[in-house]
Image (cartoon, helix red, strand yellow):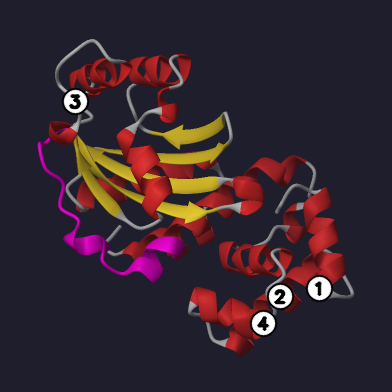
Amino acid sequence: MNGDLGSIIDMAEAAHDERIIKSGLKRFATSFGFERFAYLQTEGAKLRTFNSYPEKWQDIYLGSQYFRIDPAVTEAKRRMETISWTACDWPARGTSELKRFREQAIEHGIRSGVTIPVNGSYGSAVMLTFASSEKQADISRFQDRQKAIEAVMAIHYRLKIIAAATIVAPKRLLSPREAMCLMWAAKGKNVPETADVTGINPRTVQHYLDNARRKLDAATVPQLVAIAKDHGLV
């Protein structure tokens, strides 16, 4: 996988199981100088994650519900823009929970990284993090915000599609771009508005929605949204 955010989108388009996605994200992380990746979806007190962190750290993180205080997560959600972070900026003294989090993260090789957040549906937040054991992360190759958002959403919707594969026939599965346009339609965006927020040509947006309608046997976009919600695709 080459060192370009667009390669994540291409990989997600072709992936038919989580193993392929994990392998692709690992290669991407390495090409950008990172060692680990983590996909997170937070909604209130709920967390869904798909990552390559050490299992012991995953158990600690989830068991302690560290996503509530994780500075990378809280700052990314607050700013809703790509951020770089380093454990050097986190509290190193005292007896606080945040200090304990810092110590345990460093112990398990999570010292710096880059986090790309995106607003999800129904008040959720979706983010993709690349982490390193080095003291400082390089954010220079993540400057294209629109491409970063597309990469995160491609992973997000491919994982949802794979999860729904047991209840939706394979021929009816949506591509990440089709799912992305459907997501904005579910939020009430029309074709020109979806084109504006995604950077995709309006005619191409319409093409993706038409493909999605055919795959889900929907006559209209509102019916498409309703069917997709029934199957947990949006």
> Badge 2: how crowded within 10 Å, few (<14), some, or many (20+)?
many
Quadrant (top left/top right/bottom left/bottom right) for the N terminus? bottom left
- Which amino acid type corresponds to the residue marked 3 in the rendered image? Pro
Give the mark nearest the N terminus, 3 or 4: 3
Give the mark nearest the N terminus, 4 or 2: 4
- Which amino acid type corresponds to the residue marked 1 in the rendered image? Val
Residue 221, numbered circle: 1
Mark 4, secondary structure of its residue: helix
Q: Is 185 on the left or on the right of 38, as rendered?
A: right
* Residue that carries the numbered disc 4 in the rendered image: 191
Give the mark nearest the N terminus, 1 or 4: 4
- Which amino acid type corresponds to the residue marked 4 in the rendered image? Val
Q: Residue at x 18, y 13 (%)?
A: 94
- Please state the horizontal and vertical placement of residue 41, each as a whole percent of the image: 52, 41
Residue contact between numbered discs 3 and 1, judged by CB atoms under 8 Å: no
> Badge 1: how crowded within 10 Å, few (<14), some, or many (20+)?
some
Q: Which segment did they paint magenta?
A: 133-149
* Residue that carries the numbered disc 2 in the rendered image: 209
Residue contact between numbered discs 2 and 1, judged by CB atoms under 8 Å: yes
Magenta segment: does it hold 44? no
Residue contact between numbered discs 1 and 4, judged by CB atoms under 8 Å: no
Residue contact between numbered discs 4 and 2, judged by CB atoms under 8 Å: yes
Magenta segment: does it hold 148? yes
Residue 91, numbered circle: 3
Q: Quadrant of residue 100?
A: top left
